[in-house]
């Protein structure tokens, strides 16, 4: 069964069945996604982009059209960076495990990162996804501030864990206790701390982040 977006769907810039201009070649994979993947998986853009390869800052579709990628998770080093590809292939060819076993590679990497951090930051916690990183950041903020509330912008997306999904207004109604949301400022206007709304009368949790 395909989950159709409803009027309560607050996601911006997303594909909705029956809209956009799908090519005949893209209709089949879109139908397969609806059949095989959970409805929480969203396709970006009214007409989805279908990249087949990446190089540097560019994504390319099957027709060779180039898309400047300023969004994806690898934007910091580019797609298919030869040194990253070589390092991944080398490690995967020798050992792929986790941090609960002794292994020098994770220690070498931690030492390298800490060499670029200020002295007050003396330890590293590695995460695998943005959701996991934001979840950990929220836990640290709660521990540091004693608060539990969160202020986010409308249509924000921060992840899919229980904690981060409740901060992701773009996913739909927030999971209790939910965050306090503020409007996204239109450029070039900025929202300063003085302009932030006071605590919601419905939610009195002290902000942690």
Image: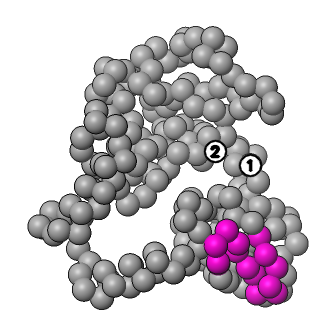
Query: Which residue corresponds to mark 2?
Result: 170
- At mark 2, the secondary structure is helix
Residue 61 tag number: none
Nearest to the observer: residue 132 or residue 38: 132
Nearest to the observer: residue 182 or residue 79: 79
Badge 2, how many Cα within 10 Å: few under 14, some, many 20+? some
- At mark 1, the secondary structure is loop
User: Can residue 75 be seen from the camera position used here?
Assistant: yes
Residue 110 as seen in the image, left or right of residue 35: left
Total marks in image:
2
Q: What segment carries the magenta color?
A: 54-67
Q: Position of residue 164 (x, y in %)?
A: 46, 43
The verdict on residue 68 being magenta is no
Nearest to the observer: residue 23 or residue 202: 23
Q: Where is residue 72 in the image (x, y as percent from the top left)?
A: 61, 62
Q: In this view, does 115 lie above or below 19?
A: above
User: Can residue 172 be seen from the camera position used here?
Assistant: no
**Residue sitting at the far front:** 115
Q: Which residue is drawn at 49% across and 39% down?
A: 166
Q: In this view, does 21 lie above or below 5?
A: below
Query: Which residue corresponds to mark 1?
Result: 12
Asked whether disc 1 touches disc 2, contact meaning CB atoms under 8 Å apart, the reply is yes
Q: Residue at x 52, y 38 (%)?
A: 167
Q: Position of residue 93 (x, y in %)?
A: 30, 88
The verdict on residue 59 being magenta is yes
Nearest to the observer: residue 118 or residue 135: 118
Image quadrant assignment for residue 13:
bottom right
Q: Where is residue 87 in the image (x, y as percent from the top left)?
A: 38, 78
Q: In this view, does 138 lie above or below 115?
A: above
């Amino acid at each position: 069964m395909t989950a159709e977006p409803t009027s309560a769907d607050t996601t911006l810039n997303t594909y909705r069945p029956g809209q956009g201009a799908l090519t005949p070649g893209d209709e089949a994979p879109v139908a397969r996604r609806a059949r095989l993947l959970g409805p929480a998986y969203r396709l970006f853009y009214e007409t989805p982009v279908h990249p087949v390869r990446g190089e540097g800052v560019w994504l390319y579709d099957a027709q060779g059209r180039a898309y400047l990628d300023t969004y994806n998770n690898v934007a910091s080093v580019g797609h298919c960076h030869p040194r990253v590809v070589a390092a991944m292939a080398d490690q995967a060819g020798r050992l792929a495990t986790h941090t609960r076993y002794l292994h020098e590679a994770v220690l070498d990497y931690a030492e390298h990162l800490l060499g670029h951090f200020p002295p007050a930051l003396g330890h590293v916690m590695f995460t695998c996804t943005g959701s996991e990183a934001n979840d950990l950041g929220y836990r640290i903020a709660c521990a540091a501030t004693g608060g539990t509330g969160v202020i986010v912008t409308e249509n924000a997306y921060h992840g899919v864990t229980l904690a981060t999904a409740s901060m992701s207004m773009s996913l739909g109604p927030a999971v209790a206790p939910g965050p306090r949301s503020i409007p996204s400022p239109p450029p070039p206007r900025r929202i300063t701390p003085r302009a932030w709304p006071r605590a919601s009368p419905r939610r009195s949790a002290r902000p942690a982040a």
